[in-house]
Image: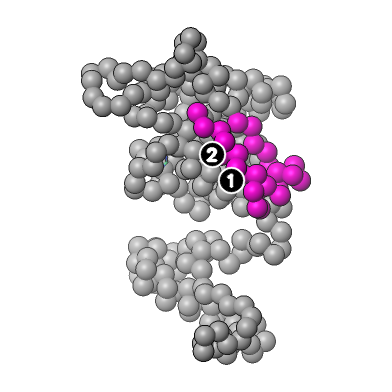
Amino acid sequence: MNFYTLSLFPDMIDGCFNTSITGRAAEKGIISLTNINIRDFSNDKHLKVDDYPYGGGAGLVMRGDCVYGAYRHAKELISQRQGDIAAGWTRVVYMTPRGEAFNHKKAVELAKEENLIILCGHYEGIDERVLEEIVTDNISIGDYVITGGEIAAVVVMDAVSRMVPEVLGNSDSAGGDSFADGLLEYPQYTRPEVFHGKKVPGVLLSGHHANVDKWRLEKSVELTKKVRPDLYERYLEARGDS
Ligand code: ADE
C-alpha cells in the first residue's frame, strides 16, 4: 500500500506514520508514504493557497488550482513508479466532516487498493469544483470538526495499514479486534495475577481454550450491549436473532 498525502502540513502526518507499527512496516517496504505539500503548487508570489469565499462569510477557502497541481503531481509519481494504469485507478480520499463515516469495513475495503491519494483540507474547505473533479471518496472520522484533515488522514492511514497483509506481526494480531466481528473487544489482562487486590478472572488461568473463547465472547456481547446498543442491534440482526 502506497499512500500519497496532499496537505499543507506534511510534518503532522510524517511523525505519526513513521512511528511504531506503521513505521516498522514502512521500513520493511510493506507500506509507504509520499507527502506532497499543496503550497508547492501555488502560483502566487507569497505562496498563498487560499482566498475569500464567493458569497461572503467567515474564513478562507483553499484554491482549486493549488490542490489540482498537487493531485497531478501525485498521479505523475504513481505513473512513473507503477505505470499509467495504476495511476488511472487510484482513488482519491478527501478527509471531511461532510463525508461518509469511517469504520472497520471501509478500512478493509481501502486496504485492498495498491495506492491511495489522501487529500487534507484546511480553513473553511476546498473549492467545490476541484473536489467534484478529483475526489472518489469523502470520509469523516466522526461527528465533530477538527482543525484540518491531517489528523483524520493519520487515523485512516493507520486503520487501513493494519488491514494490509503482513503489517501486523503475530504479536499485534488484528484477530480479536473490536469491530472485526461486529462486537467490541473483550477485556485483556497480563501479569501480575493480582493487581491492587483484583484477581485475573479464573477462566483465563484455566488453560481451557473453549471456555476462554466462550468467556471472551460473553464479555464482548455484554460490553457492546452496554456501550454501543446500535452495534449490538446489528450484531443480533446479522445472527438472525432480532
Ligand atoms: N476535517 C475536519 N474535521 C474532520 C472530520 N471529522 N473527519 C475528517 N476530516 C475532517
- Quarter of the figure that contains the N terminus: top right
Q: Foreground: 132 or 39?
A: 39
Mark 1 surroundings within 10 Å by alpha-carbon count, few (fewer than 14), some (14 through 19), many (20 or more): some
Question: Which numbered tag is attached to residue 16?
Answer: 1
Decide: marks 1, 2 in contact (CB < 8 A)? yes
Q: Which residues are magenta?
A: 8-35
Give the mark count.
Answer: 2
Displayed quadrant of residue 98: top left
Amino acid type shown at disc 1: Cys
The image position of residue 60, as x and y in percent, is 34, 24
Q: Foreground: 110 or 117?
A: 117
Q: Quadrant of ligand 1?
A: top left
**The CB of the residue at mark 2 lies under 8 Å from ligand 1:** no
Question: In 3D space, how far apart are the residues under numbered discs 1 and 2 (Cα atoms)?
Answer: 7 Å
Q: How is the image coloured?
A: one colour
* Residue positioned 72% across, 26% down in the render: 81
- Quarter of the figure that contains the C terminus: bottom left
Displayed quadrant of residue 91: top right
Q: Foreground: 6 or 198?
A: 198
Residue most extreme to the front = 46
The image position of residue 240, as x and y in percent, is 41, 68
The correct choice, above or below, for 68 with respect to 152 in the image is above
* Residue positioned 41% across, 31% down in the render: 122
Mark 1 secondary-structure assignment = helix
Question: Is residue 66 in sight in this rendering?
Answer: yes
Mark 2 secondary-structure assignment = helix
The correct choice, above or below, for 51 with respect to 33 in the image is above
The image position of residue 225, as x and y in percent, is 38, 72
* Residue positioned 42% across, 25% down in the render: 131
